[in-house]
Amino acid sequence: MDDRAAADLDELESRTIYILREAFFSVAPLCMLWSMGKDSTALLWMARKAFLGKVPFPVALLDTGMELPEVYRFRDEIGAAWDLDLRNEVCPPESGVDQTLPPGARAAARKTAGLRALIAREQYRGIIVGIRRDEQAIRAKERVFSRRARDGGWDVKGQPPELWDVFVSEIEDGMHLRIHPLLDWTEVDIWRYIKRESIPVVPLYFARDGRRYRSLGEKNITFPIESSAATLDEIIAELETTRAPERAGRSMDHETESAFELLRLGGYM
Amino acid sequence: MTRIVAAGHVDHGKSTIIARLLHDTGSLPDGKVDELQRASASRGVPFEWSFALDALQSERDQAVTVETTQMLLHLPQRDVLLIDAPGHREFLRNMVTGASSADAAMIVVDAAQGVAEQTLRHALFLQLLGITQAIVVVNKMDLAGYAREPFEAIRHEMAERLRSLNVRAGAFVPAVGRDGDNLLTRSSKMSWYDGKTVAEALAELRAPVPQKSAELRVMVQGVLRRGQSRTIVGRVTSGVLKEGLDVSLWPSGRTAKIARIERWPDRGGDATVRAGAPVAFAIDEPYYVERGDIVSGTSGGPALVSRLRVRLLWLAGYALRPGQHLRLKVGTRTAHVELLSIERAIDVQTLRERPEGEAAHGDVIDATFRSREVIAVDDFATSPALGRFILLDGTDIVGGGTIQPETIVERTPANVVAVDHLLDRDSRAWRNGHRGAVVWLTGLPASGKSTIAMSVERRLFEKGYQVYVLDGDNMRSGLCSDLTFSHSDRSENIRRVAEVAALFADAGFIVIAAFISPYRKDRDDARRAAGERFYEVHVAADVATCERRDPKGHYRKARAGEILNFSGVSDVYEEPEAPELTLDTAAQPLEESVATLLRFVEDTLAISARHGAPA
């Protein structure tokens, strides 16, 4: 890694730690979502750094029961090794969501419903989410401290201003904040950071028999890509040259032009 | 990574230039162009580059950027982050959001339409948000016949404008965003131009270097408690922090040593934390440190102020007026503030100064705030992170801006330092923004004491002062209800009033005592009780004038012998010999006396930049 890339990682990490501390010291009760994917695992690592080894808030999983077995194994191992306060939120069954939705959107709707139930029960005022701007054009329009209405909805056209790194943590009762400490990171930044910090990840990211998962989601709607990248260095090299979009293997994004926007307006991450 | 915001008038082609740059540099993912083609076709419009950024359905349907977007641009020279910000005035809040996170700007001007008001407005906002460098792209040169003259005219005008705002213009580039002319490669259609391409000009913009050499500032985010240990966590915004360093803590002014710097995981090596980085540390003294505090070196610390001179952008839908109470958040500190005055407000629609005293949505305003708490600040130019702020009204952000150097005349006074948890007079004074005092109004019955006291109380209260009126009504009904109007009881009444007033003044209040208090000796005793915080004000009107007013009919009753020992009629009134102030209520209207007393109180008791620290 050249000096500029190392300096960029330092800068990204510094801002993420700053945001995590702002969230912890100004929003309560607070919780973080962990999908067991590379991004939120890297974010958990930075939360340990920010708070000197121990994540000081609960870590919630929105469990559809449809993750791959390797993912559940990773959850149990890391949860114990990192001494996390894990909350496994079982999402309502598929039969409970709008049956007219396409299959990808139905899984997302289950997670959205699970998150809504979790917030209603625990009265969380802040949810830390590891999304990045470069994943998806709609996510690129997010704020760092992003308000959600009582129903969890995102008023993307009525977002209040956000100036510099001075965040507004005050909200009315019944609303909550989505806090996004990873917005500035790109996919390859995350991998470079995972390598530099030796952060463990689910082994499914590494190629076996010419295929690997570039993005992890429910097993019925997420598919591995063709790849021979079997090490961190090979993944980084692959991402430095590829122009294939990261979420190409996630069917929920592509069912219609507005599919992802509608999911997010409804409260999806 | 340099972060560059695109600004300019709506429809001058910002999103198109960005999208075309993204495409031509291979920064767009596969399949994106196909998606844009489908999105364009479904709306019955020709291929629309801007849909790459305008991803919201409503943005595509209405062909306007609503919300700011950021995208990584892989230039041949280096990567930069491009921030697309809406040009439409309705989405000002989104424009400033995008611009506030940028290091530099790309200002887009339509070659055929020229420099629009909105272009200038954006330039003004950029400067307000702290951006000091920009490039200018003169777009849609095809509509100007690819000719040199219109380009030069725009270049000349923009260069002038940017110079007046202290924004450095790196390059002026004629271009056609839609066709890619002069974006990545030089266009054959404008062979007269031999300057940089847009890509070359963008690659030369640099993020400001973190201020390692500047004075140390650490913004305290909070304190982590684990068992008996207390770890202060925050961010070094300038300078360098190391173990063993002597530091000052603000606003308490105490000094301590950095006992240790904590890191996780601890990989050993040099425990030095530089500007921009997060930090966790402990100090060698058991001082109370909290979120919002500032750590500096033992010299060159921030200014402690209770008045702030600022330049701000007003974003609320309602007009801003003096007297407005808001919260001001600077760094991690939130203070309660009140707007004292608007020095100047620019209506950015017309770019003209507003007549007086009021400011509306979108205005750029020079103003003075008083803060209830003493806060540690720097001016923006010295320390950006501690020199910029947002304004909150309830849960809404209603503005943001920068602290102006005029604020900093109020340098850290030595006497606010280290009071060891005992609140002294000065601490209260700093919090209130004024000193506690007894303003003693003496004068004949019906000379105007009560009317003046009530008016001044109300006006001071509205200005944020802690103020309270003591008069016959509230004293005689309780504390002094056992007293008559005999000479000795009148003296005892004044003695009790004087003691109560002195206590109020100790508690930080400005007490306005309105009593006839006819005997010089009693008033001198009252002065002794309050010490140097006593101000005698003679409300002067002759007996004839007072008797003519006689609102309660007391003079008539005194003349008729129905009231005994009535000052000025059947008892003496000893005029003050050397009052601090005389209000001639016989010669001038009461309103004028009220104004005179208000000015006296503000000039004498307010803690302001003009008067410096309390004695």
Image: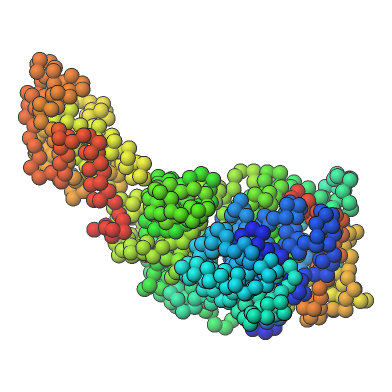
Give the quadrant of residue B111.
Answer: bottom right
**Where does residue B365 sit, x and y in percent of width and height?**
45, 55
**Side of B343 relative to A73 (left or right):** left
Between B272 and B434, the one lying in front of the other is B434
Residue A150's place in the image compared with B116, above or below, is above
Residue A21's place in the image compared with B521, above or below, is below
Between B164 and A107, the one lying in front of the other is B164
Residue ID at (43%, 50%)? B354
**Side of A163 relative to A147 (left or right):** left
Residue ID at (59%, 48%)? A171
**Where does residue B94 sit, x and y in percent of width and height?**
61, 56
**Where does residue B181 sit, x and y in percent of width and height?**
71, 74
Residue A126 visible within the image: no
Question: Which quarter of the rendered picture does the N terminus of chain B lie within?
Answer: bottom right
Residue B589's place in the image compared with A199, above or below, is above
**Where does residue B410 sit, x and y in percent of width and height?**
33, 62
**Side of B393 relative to B521 (left or right):** right
Residue B593 visible within the image: yes
